[in-house]
Image (cartoon, helix red, strand yellow):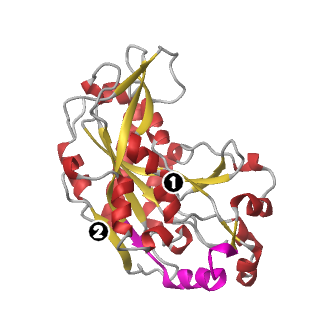
Amino acid sequence: MDHSQTSLAVCPAQPRPQSSNLDSFLQSTTPIVPAQYFSKTTVKGWRTAESECHPFFTLGDLWESYKEWSAYGAGVPLVLNGGDTVVQYYVPYLSAMQLYVDPSIAALTLRHLGDESDAESPRDSSSDCDSDPDKHLKHIGEEQNHMESNVQRLTRFSLSDNGEMSSLDFEYLENDSPYSREPLADKISLLASKHHKLKTLRSCDLLPSSWLSVAWYPIYRIPTGPTLKDLDACFLTYHNLSTPVKSGTTRQPHSPSTHYQTDRSPKLSLPIFGLASYKFKGSVWTPYGASERQRIDVLLRAAENWLQFLQVDHPDYRFFTRNSYRR
């Protein structure tokens, strides 16, 4: 990658947005995946009708959501100090991932599922939970807005039901320089050729200690627009990969949440619970006051607390935090 220029698409000036540039980045880089539900036959022996209303997703669908971003970049609308609106494009790279599988949960779901056809389609099964999709409408950044109250609760939801950490089923920690990395979709395709579970595992098979970190780097080519070094910022985002399989299972503060898109089909968004930055310029990203800068600090502490609890030495996090600067 050529780190000398940044790709921007300049748009007409617009009024001050309701959300900040930081909000725009968090929303634009939050993955959204199709929600799936267990059929009535599957949950028949689980002694709870509410199990049907707990959606899940497959890891294969998650990687599919990154496919277009990996090829073209995720467009992040930003408002500059002068009032001009620009779109900065970021390419995602796999930074780290840990998958903790609870054998008892995996055996339970597989025993009842039999094959993929046993899961109902999102449109059919959603009617069993609630016929009014308006009750499920959620803004992608809803859980992020409550980060300050939830950050201290992170480590309470990283254990199996018996209070013990399950054995690590899969781990990937990127060590290569950003210059030599493949975009996330390409990297996952390579890893999945050797580890097929990376596309077949379901979020309901995973313990809450399962997580993903994505490194976002701006595209350093200019099809149109000026070059602005103030937008050279790079980010690490952290996402939880687990969803509960049954009602009564404790829901972690930042687990995937359900909402509906324009086609009224249920989706799951994976909110960003932690964030680290590199070459971050506060004058551009947090122009509206100390509350935004505090939020950056809270997101950074959340990432730090998570890694410390799991005792993970995350190379990208270490590099970002040691080399980060603001102004």
**Image location of residue 173, percent across then percent down:** 27, 63
Main secondary structure found in the magenta portion: helix
Measuring from the top left, give residue 2's x and y in whole percent: 20, 36
Label 1 environment density (alpha carbons within 10 Å; few <14, some 14–19, many ≥20): many
Q: Residue at x 30, y 66 (%)?
A: 172
> Does 265 lie within the magenta span?
no
- For residue 270, the mark is 1
Magenta span includes 110: yes
Which of the pair 310/46 is nearer the observer? Answer: 46
Residue sitting nearer the eye, 143 or 125: 125
At 23% across and 28% down in the image, what residue appears?
5
The residue range painted magenta reads 98-118
Q: Amino acid at mark 2?
A: Gln
Return the residue at label 2: 311
Task: Work out whether residue 152 can be spotted.
Answer: yes
- Identify the secondary structure beneath mark 1: loop
Callout 1 amino acid: Leu
Determine the secondary structure under disc 2. Answer: loop
Residue 301 image offset from top left, x and y in percent: 34, 51
Q: Is residue 208 visible?
A: no
